[in-house]
């Protein structure tokens, strides 16, 4: 049995990993050079509780189930995860009403521990919150994670359990015969397959169309962000939401797992064709600041590290599209708008256990190891442990990124695990994520990548073809 999973974002990577528990040949395809370079790369990174979504939707069901799976999955895959809880803040009587609606909805969805608390309690725990806060909904099961590390880790673990990874390979055609999937054609080859799983993110409707499968149209909804440096880390300790609007969860203020503070996102509906429009705008960033200041008035804007934007794949109808399709052997895991990151582990499990296993008659493998050790980070090691590593291999002492204390040994480990681009190293190790934003370390990372791959730095890029960093080497 040969299964092609198309899309190595957090959804496809976790599906591929889940499928390697079974006797099947699993092939994971992405046109990008590395896992997690699509929607997974730019979002709020929140593991939602499940009180925002209407009961009875896939979004509500998979969000609550996914939230419960996160602690174990992250522990097994060596992915950062902190269950810090969230406050939804109400500043008026009308907003207090919304809190009650959210609590009832969350309870109907099975969200544990939701409580309404007074403004004083919020301020006692989050002193920088706007003192006009009247009441809040506290959701203890909300967490934060690193979505791209989760996608990388799941792909890496899938490969360790036998999956074949195909990066820089775009799926161009899907052939069917008598209403059943037969083969896929990529930019490199033709593969006979028994099944295709559509986890193509913003392009899930287009991939479905290749197989003649109807799929709700996807519209990109842009979310712009501002990231504050870790020098602002004491500003907030939990995720702060405003009361939601019908369009989005609103502009938030939250800590990141790397110690920074994230502000955003906006919610801007773009044209269908604008699926790569991840630029930020003056208006968008002004909206982010205004929204964040509503929750935390004294924002230290001098600590701004960067701004960026991500695109939500909003499917017509609003809900995830998960499960079998009218073409046999073609399965969907698309329309994965928010809370798609949270839902991903539950979607992967559902699709494998409840859809593909019975339909394709898959049997459990005897050997499957869900554990993937993380790349060690400076902050997780004591001075003595660091010293020991340097004694054993001096490359642990050769610092490449001074802002985040990343050594040559960590960069090499990232390359050994599949990093092929500067962003691949950055997203695996944190090099270039610090105060200087790669001004110092990018050249050094390029040099190491070039040396290890035996190519010229001019052949390397930031994040794949079209983002090359150097034209040519002027000095050897
Ligand atoms: C602004 C914003 C905020 C969000 N906040 C949260 C949050 O806090 N919590 C939460 O739970 N969710 C959140 N989400 C949603 C979450 O980020 C997504 O649901 C999730 O990342 C989607 O992952 P994916 O794997 O489906 O898509 P992607 O990561 O986009 O992966 C799809 C992959 O398919 C590949 N692909 C497409 N077509 C082809 C083809 N023909 N051949 C080969 N490869 C192909 C692409 O290159 C891409 O890498 C947010 C999203 C956004 C944009």
Image (cartoon, helix red, strand yellow):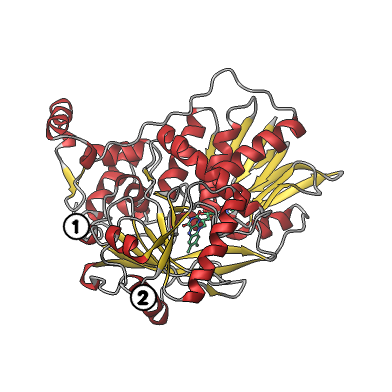
Who is closer to the viewer here, 213 or 469? 213
Q: State the residue at coordinates (43%, 32%).
A: 76
Confirm whether residue 28 shows in the render. no
Q: Is residue 374 left or right of residue 156?
A: left
- Percent across and percent down for residue 100 are 54, 63
Rendered residue at 67%/55% (across/down): 57
Q: Which residue is mark 1?
A: 440
Q: Which element is circle 1 on?
A: loop
Quarter of the picture holding the N terminus: top right
In percent of width and height, residue 24 lies at 65, 28
- The residue sitting at the bottom extreme is 283
Image spot of residue 243 (x, y percent): 48, 69
Q: Where in the figure is residue 54, as x and y percent of width and height?
A: 63, 59
Residue 294 image label: 2
SS type, badge 2: helix
Q: Residues within 10 Å of mark 1 (few under 14, many from 20)?
A: some
Residue 86 can be seen in this image: yes
Q: In the shown orientation, is residue 388 left or right of residue 294?
A: left
Q: Earlier in the sequence, mark 1 or mark 2?
A: 2
Mark 1 or 2: the one toward you:
2
Q: Quadrant of residue 362?
A: top right
Q: Nearer the viewer, residue 73 or 115?
A: 115
Mark pair 1, 2: CA separation: 36 Å
Question: Compared with residue 307, is residue 397 higher up or lower down, i.e. above or below?
Answer: above
């Amino acid at each position: 049995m040969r299964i092609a999973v198309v899309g190595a974002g957090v959804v496809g990577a976790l599906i591929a990993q889940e499928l390697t528990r079974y006797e099947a040949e699993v092939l994971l395809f992405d046109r990008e050079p590395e896992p997690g370079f699509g929607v997974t790369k730019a979002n709020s990174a929140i593991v939602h509780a499940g009180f925002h979504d209407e009961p009875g939707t896939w979004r509500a069901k998979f969000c609550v189930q996914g939230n419960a799976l996160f602690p174990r999955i992250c522990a097994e895959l060596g992915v950062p995860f902190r269950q810090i809880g969230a406050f939804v803040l109400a500043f008026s009587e009308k907003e207090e009403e919304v809190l009650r609606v959210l609590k009832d909805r969350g309870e109907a969805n099975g969200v544990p521990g939701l409580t309404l608390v007074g403004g004083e309690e919020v301020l006692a725990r989050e002193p920088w919150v706007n003192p006009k806060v009247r009441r809040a909904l506290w959701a203890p099961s909300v967490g934060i994670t690193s979505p791209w590390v989760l996608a990388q880790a799941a792909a890496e673990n899938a490969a360790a359990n036998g999956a074949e990874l195909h990066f820089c390979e775009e799926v161009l055609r899907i052939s069917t015969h008598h209403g059943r999937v037969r083969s896929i054609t990529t930019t490199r080859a033709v593969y006979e397959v028994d099944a295709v799983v559509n986890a193509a993110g913003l392009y899930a409707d287009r991939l479905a169309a290749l197989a003649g499968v109807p799929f709700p149209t996807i519209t990109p909804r842009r979310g712009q962000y501002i990231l504050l440096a870790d020098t602002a880390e004491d500003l907030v300790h939990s995720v702060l939401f405003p009361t939601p609007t019908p369009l989005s969860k609103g502009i938030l203020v939250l800590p990141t797992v790397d110690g920074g503070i994230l502000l955003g996102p906006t919610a801007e509906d773009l044209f269908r064709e604008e699926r790569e429009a991840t630029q930020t705008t003056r208006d968008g960033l002004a909206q982010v600041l205004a929204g964040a200041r509503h929750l935390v008035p004294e924002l230290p804007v001098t600590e701004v590290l960067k701004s960026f934007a991500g695109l939500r794949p909003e499917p017509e109808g609003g809900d995830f599209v998960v499960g079998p399709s009218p073409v046999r052997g073609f399965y969907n895991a698309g329309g994965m708008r928010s809370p798609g990151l949270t839902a991903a582990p539950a979607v992967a499990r559902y699709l494998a256990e409840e859809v593909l296993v019975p339909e394709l008659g898959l049997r459990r493998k005897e050997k499957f190891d869900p554990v993937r050790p993380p790349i060690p980070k400076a902050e997780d090691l004591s001075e003595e442990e660091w010293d020991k590593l340097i004694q054993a291999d001096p490359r642990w002492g050769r610092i490449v990124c001074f802002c985040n204390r990343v050594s040559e040994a960590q960069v090499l480990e990232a390359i050994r695990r599949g990093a092929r681009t500067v962003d691949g190293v950055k997203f695996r190790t944190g090099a270039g994520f610090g105060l200087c934003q790669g001004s110092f370390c990018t050249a050094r990372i390029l040099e190491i990548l070039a040396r290890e791959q035996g190519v010229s730095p001019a052949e390397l890029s930031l994040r794949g073809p079209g983002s090359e960093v150097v034209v040519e080497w002027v000095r050897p």
